[in-house]
Image: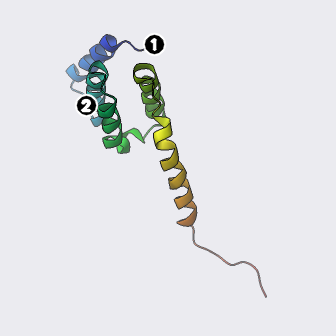
Amino acid sequence: MFDLNISKDLITIYQKEGKESPLINLFNFIVEAIKKKDFALFKLLVDKYKPSLDRDSNFMEALDSMSKHYFKKPLKAQFAFAGLMRNMLDLFTCSRPFTHTSSI
């Protein structure tokens, strides 16, 4: 499914082209966490880089798949409640102004 050596090689090639980003750093650390079989470190990294990961839902999907594959634990359950709470909060803090349209 996921080949860590290929992943590490792709990251190295990307960095040699002079391209740096928080996500490249994250994936370097993710590879190391997987090699060490350290799920706590894996989760910590995902938590710390969450703002960057939120730019594209595919990142969390991929990390959830990696977590299931290498640690036999899903990441999604950890973030499902947070997403639900965020959606509920958005309902209450709607940025649209309230306009009353009925006439009495």
Residue pictured at 27% horizontal, 13% vertical: 9
Q: Secondary structure at mark 2?
A: helix
Between 30 and 14, the residue placed more toward the observer is 30
Using the numbered discs, state the Cα–Cα distance from disc 1 to disc 2 in whole angstroms. Answer: 22 Å
Disc 1 marks which amino acid? Met
Residue wearing tag 2: 25
User: Residue 1, located in which quarter of the rendered image?
Assistant: top left
Q: Secondary structure at mark 1?
A: loop
Name the outermost residue toward the bottom.
Answer: 104
Between 31 and 38, the residue placed more toward the observer is 38
Disc 2 marks which amino acid? Asn
Q: Is residue 90 above or below residue 29?
A: below
Residue wearing tag 1: 1
Nearest-to-viewer mark from 1 and 2? 1
Residue pictured at 28% horizontal, 17% vertical: 8
Residue pictured at 25% horizontal, 31% vertical: 25
- x, y percent for residue 30: 30, 27
- x, y percent for residue 2: 41, 15
Q: Is residue 29 above or below residue 4?
A: below
Between 12 and 4, the residue placed more toward the observer is 4
- Among numbered discs 1 and 2, the one appearing first in the sequence: 1
Identify the disc placed on residue 21. Answer: none
Q: Residues within 10 Å of mark 1 (few under 14, many from 20)?
A: few
User: Mark 1 near mark 2, Cβ–Cβ under 8 Å?
Assistant: no
Left or right: 34 as drawn, with respect to 1 = left
Quadrant in the picture for the C terminus: bottom right
- x, y percent for residue 52: 35, 41
Q: Residues within 10 Å of mark 2 (few under 14, many from 20)?
A: few
- x, y percent for residue 83: 51, 48
